[in-house]
Amino acid sequence: MDSDGIECVSSIDGMMDVETSLPHHTSSKSHGGGGGGGGPHPGVAPATSVHELLECPVCTNSMYPPIHQCQNGHTLCSTCKTRVHNRCPTCRQELGDIRCLALEKVAESLELPCKYGSLGCPEIFPYYSKLKHESQCSYRPYSCPYAGSECLVVGDIPFLVTHLRDDHKVDMHTGCTFNHRYVKSNPREVENATWMLTVFNCFGHYFCLHFEAFQLGMAPVYMAFLRFMGDENEARSFSYSLEVGANGRKLTWEGTPRSIRDGHRKVRDSHDGLIIQRNMALFFSGGDRKELKLRVTGRIWKEQQGNETGVCMPNLCS
Ligand SMILES: [Zn+2]
Ligand SMILES: [Zn+2]
Ligand SMILES: [Zn+2]
Ligand SMILES: [Zn+2]
């Protein structure tokens, strides 16, 4: 938790069985998928496949032309070549500027499995389209959704859930309704980004509830929004509502959670959530306006129509 004095108290109704998710580390290295398809052969693939020859011995990524080699024939990728100061990392000889045209030709003729094969992607691509696919692959690892720091951790969802809980000490809750109280002793301090993250586990998925303070134009505001720990298509099959209020007034927001593929800043800047003006927030807090005390209640539900393709809103399509 951050140390800026915000405190968060929550009570959950509708407790469900707590499911403990085991850490599930991702590996960037994936072998397998024999050259260009073929049926699933039980047993072991040939030990030195062409794919292994095309694996850079330094960074273990697939090599793309230009592929370089030293005078003794050790290969390495063009990215690594710029990093090794003209010394072959394998034999320490001077590297020079020798291309390995034979290997480049082999590379161009190959079809390769997506590098996220070990994370579940079954796709196989001609060498050059592989890179393009991998930048969009729906099995590619997610970035850590933690908002308060530039965290560079990536991984699949179970891994990130464990990471949020253990490394960022994020509160974890089970259930699809929530009742959260945000208390801040000095509501005048909006400048230092104030934010909170709570994770909810329901419908077998994880959702990030963000609460942030920021400057909207000249006006300090608070904002709450939900992000789905999964990809965009699946996020669209859920909806959520947020409510905040007191003294006979309330603000309600109903929306679709955004995927954590969209950074929290991007979601915030698109105002895709419940925005509370500071004056209103202080009014809701009651008391002498010296303290922020907001009770945010909310609910997450699954839409009846599984909107599988995701691009089509029911009312907008003919
Ligand atoms: Zn390399
Ligand atoms: Zn060498
Ligand atoms: Zn893929
Ligand atoms: Zn992190």
Image (cartoon, grey):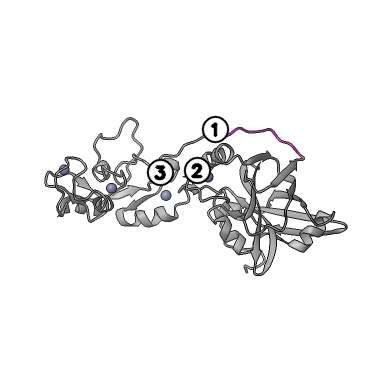
Judging depth in this view, the residue of 94 and 43 nearest the camera is 94
N-terminal-most mark, 2 or 3: 3
* Residue assigned mark 2: 156
Q: Reply above or below: 200 against 220.
A: above
Query: Which residue has dot 3 on it?
Result: 117
Residue that badge 1 annotates: 22
Mark 2 Cα shell of 10 Å, populated few (<14), some (14-19), many (≥20): many
* Left or right: where 262 falls relative to 42: right
- Which residue type does callout 2 highlight? Asp
Q: Which residues are magenta?
A: 14-22
Count neighbours of disc 3 (C-alpha within 10 A) and say few if under 14, some if 14 to 19, many if 20 or more.
some
Assess whether residue 248 is covered by the magenta stretch.
no
Instruction: Give the image location of residue 49, x and y in percent.
Output: 25, 40
* Image side of residue 272 versus residue 53, left or right: right
Tag 3: residue type?
Gly
Query: Upstream in the sequence, badge 2 or badge 1?
Result: 1
Q: Single out the mark in the foreground, 3 or 1.
A: 1
Dot 1 beta carbon under 8 Å from ligand 4 = no
Mark 3–mark 1 CB contact (< 8 Å): no
Instruction: Tell which residue pokes out farthest to the top in this image.
Output: 43
Secondary structure, mark 3, is: helix
